[in-house]
Amino acid sequence: MSQAPLLAGVVGNPIGHSRSPALHGHWLRRYGIAGHYIPIELRPEHFETGIRALPKLGFRGINVTIPYKETILSMADQVSDRASLIGAANTIMFREDGGIYADNTDGYGFISNLEHHAPAWSAKSGPALVLGAGGAAKAIVAAMVQAGAPEIRIANRTRNRAEALRERFGARVTVVDWNMAAGAMADTATIINTTSLGMDGQPPLNLTFEAAPKSALATDIVYAPLITPFLSRAAEAGLVTVDGLGMLLHQAAPGFQHWFGVRPDVDDDLRAAVLSA
């Protein structure tokens, strides 16, 4: 008797834009795994009922995306230290008893992307400037603190959201007024856009890089388009740049390993498969 296919998926609202099915589908084919990774759109009033049903249907786990990364924590039976610190989860494992283990791999994906594409980069090299203070910024600030960044400057259009991150992550975090962000690039080692500015359909992030050291690295979590105006300007100023697609690819690997039993490779073939989806 053949074994039932292994099941995982991604839950959000909406979900049609997600590249995760193409990503995991590529790995399933590459490693010859009998399994499926399924996009699931759940409306807020159906979210908890829908999640509770998934282990009964044979799902080993799921990714959770907008707008449910914080909601899932209130349902979890176990929460990883990093998900607890960030206050959000993106990777869920279902226990044999149907219980929920919640983790956050976004920060892991962010750091792994930089190490992959800029091997000489180190968070310890100097201060970081983080543009934005939303959910992605929380994961990235937590990862940069853990990676040893000596100072993390946060600039956000709404200052009180940046202040909330300082309260959450402590003394290494300082808050910069949004209109002073360009000047705050002075002596930085890492400059990070976590906002949606520059994404397809959004206005660009209009910042100059005149104050940034030529040794700094600039990275954007946006990957549609792959080269955002932010990255283009940084490259013109002579900075090393890393696009945001690798963060998506690397954050997916721990979940895939848990659900399907193989630690997958993140490589050029995977990038091409996701970009063509």
Image: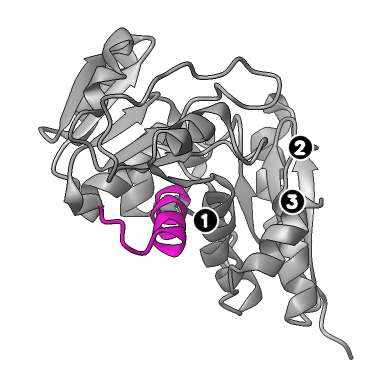
Residue 204 falls in which quadrant of the image? top right
Q: Is residue 113 rendered magenta in the image? A: yes
Mark 1 residue crowding within 10 angstroms, few (<14) / some (14–19) / many (20+):
many
Q: Which residues are magenta?
A: 106-122
Residue 164 falls in which quadrant of the image? top left
What is the three-letter code of the residue carrying label 2?
His
Mark 3 residue crowding within 10 angstroms, few (<14) / some (14–19) / many (20+):
some
Residue placed furthest toward the right? 1
Q: Nearer the viewer, residue 92 or 152?
A: 152
Q: Position of residue 47 (x, y in %)?
A: 67, 35
Residue on which disc 2 sits: 17
Q: Compute the Cα span from label 3 to label 1.
A: 16 Å
Mark in front: 2 vs 3: 3
Residue on which disc 1 sits: 251
Q: Is residue 167 rendered magenta in the image? A: no
Residue 13 falls in which quadrant of the image? top right
Instruction: Verify CB contact (< 8 Å) between mark 2 and mark 3.
Output: no
Q: Position of residue 51 (x, y in %)?
A: 67, 45
Residue 106, placed above or below residue 141: below
Principal secondary structure, stretch drawn in magenta: helix
Q: Nearer the viewer, residue 181 or 112?
A: 181
Q: Position of residue 186 (x, y in %)?
A: 20, 28
Of the numbered discs 3 and 1, the one sitting upstream in the chain is: 1
Residue on which disc 3 sits: 275
Mark 2 residue crowding within 10 angstroms, few (<14) / some (14–19) / many (20+):
few
Instruction: Verify CB contact (< 8 Å) between mark 2 and mark 1.
Output: no
Residue 45, placed above or below residue 79: above
At x 63%, y 27%, the residue is 199
